[in-house]
Image (cartoon, rainbow, N blue to C red):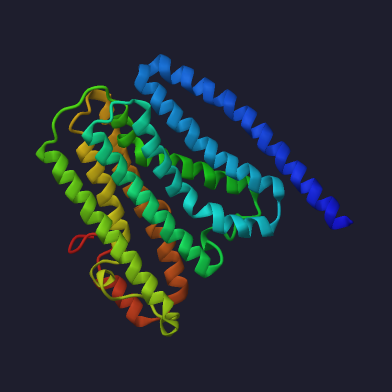
Amino acid sequence: MKNSINRKFTYYTTHDCVHTCGVHFDRLYRLVLTVTHVMLGDMGSSLGKAAAIDFGIQWGCWAVAAALQTEKFYDLAAFLVEAPIGSGTILYLALLSLKWNKTNYRRQRIVSWLAATWGFRLGLFLFSRILKEGQDRRFNKVRTKPSTFFVYWTIQGVWVFATLLPTLILNSKKEDKPLTRRDYVGYGLWATGFLLETIADYQKSTFRSNPDNHKTFINQGLWRMVQYPNYLGEIMMWSGLYLSSSTVLKGWEHVGVLSPIFVAYLLTNVSGIPMQQRSAMKRYGSDPAYLEYLKSTPKLLPFIW
């Protein structure tokens, strides 16, 4: 009887929360569209819609998690939400923004599908990793703290929008020009980065799947050349997409350069390298071989840093 009452309470609490969030999201969506359209015209409307949908997805997922207030839900969220939602939002918005303007230029199609391909690949990789490990360790200390958890979801929304910014601006353009050498250099940079990140992730997953390596750090393949080849690949990809998009960007539209800058800053100063370093030092800090690896192996750029 008690379990039945709890299930009903949980259902109605979640239902009410989702309904309330939906009402507030609709109001926020209309407000954002109005303001951005007044400020930037049709392009502002596209950017406003993308921002509203982006944060609506992040905050909606957070609201459901906060409403249920159970560790079981958070464990479920680790499988269904935490890993794929960020990359999934990028995939969704990249393709959705391509349809909004209805110009469907070749450059827009290529950049949008490259961004979507990255989102799909990363989402699958993170999802499969969580299936193996049981949960995402990054959220261990915040999973039961709704207010702190909200900050994480919000930061993810900022990451999605900032990362996709040149793609969103490009897909809002009414005019186009033939592909240039800069476009192809950008596509080449993206392809190189994509291969680098994919291979690095595969090598690390294969290394970790071997029980004999559970207490050993990876120092083979791409990881022998730099400490974080996957992060180098990601920075290269978004730099390549901005480079291609910049061919037709004008004036303030070059704010899209914030995409690779933001990704690079985030990975090297906030959530990427610093977090990985702290975790690795706890596990391997007493291993002389690991300390030597840190001294002799560049962090990100071979022979430079």
On the image, the x and y values in percent for residue 233 come to 27, 56
Give residue 143's position: percent from left, percent from top: 61, 55
The residue nearer to you, when weighing 279 against 190, is 190
Return the residue found at the far left: 181
How many numbered marks appear? Answer: 0
| Up/down of 79 relative to 41, above or below | below
Q: Position of residue 13 (x, y in %)?
A: 75, 42
Residue 192 placement: quadrant = bottom left
Residue name at image x 65 percent, y 51 percent:
145
Q: Residue furthest top?
A: 38
Task: Looking at the picture, tell me which residue is in the foreground, 101 or 18.
Answer: 101
Look at 41% across and 75% down and name the residue there.
208
The answer to whether residue 159 is seen in the rendering is no
Q: Quadrant of the N terminus?
A: bottom right
Vertical arrangement, residue 27 with respect to residue 304, above or below: above
Q: Position of residue 52 (x, y in %)?
A: 49, 31
Residue plotted at (19% across, 50% down): 189
